[in-house]
Image (spheres, grey):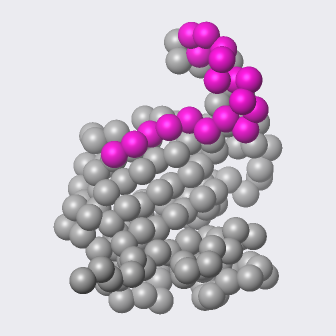
Amino acid sequence: MNKKMKKLNLGCGNDYKKGWVNLDLIDVKKDIKHDLNKIPYPFKKSLFDETLMKMILEHVQDPIGVLKEVIRISKDNAKIIVIVPHATSYANFTDLQHKTNFTETSFNKELLEEYELKELELTKVDFIYTNSWKKFIPFKKFFKIFLNGIYDDLLFEFKVKK
């Protein structure tokens, strides 16, 4: 028996995904209107197989609380994808609504334990380049402190382990 996966597009913005539950507060096409800063979210526990949070975690007042809530509404072995601007990106510096900065080490194992997010297992970290030529710059991992703006966005992929 192959059940249909239940997917959540949290903070969907203009990226309405057909076949997903699309949630946002702003005036865009969505299935559910809800403020991500108001926990709990209007879902039963262990409901979703996959959650996408694209460019929203840096805007919320309590990103750890939001992640805990997403864990609550996620099934065991669910996938959570978080896309955020890198702390040194131009977009991060210029958006006055950003409340939290992220780097590639923001969710290492020790920090997940410190944040009491032990049910999250980090399975992937990747850099997203909006300007593809940046990926060809040599030694950028070593010189990143001097090359502000070299990284654009980050992708974190987690697996929920309940």
122 vs 53, left or right, is left
Residue 80 x/y as whole percent: 42, 61
> To which quarter of the image does residue 13 belong?
bottom right
> To which quarter of the image does residue 25 belong?
bottom right
Residue 149 x/y as whole percent: 71, 28
Residue 105 x/y as whole percent: 43, 35
Residue at x-position 52% and y-position 64%: 52
Instruction: Please state, as top left, top right, bottom left or bottom right, where the N terminus lies in the image.
Output: bottom left
Extreme residue in the left direction: 162
User: Which contiguous range is marked in magenta?
Assistant: 123-140
Residue 82 visible in the current orientation:
yes
Q: Nearer the viewer, residue 3 or 114?
A: 3
Position of residue 74 relative to residue 32, above or below, is: above
Residue at x-position 60% and y-position 59%: 54
107 vs 15, left or right, is left
Instruction: Please state, as top left, top right, bottom left or bottom right, where the C terminus lies in the image.
Output: bottom left
Q: Nearer the viewer, residue 101 or 23?
A: 23
Q: Nearer the viewer, residue 157 or 103?
A: 157
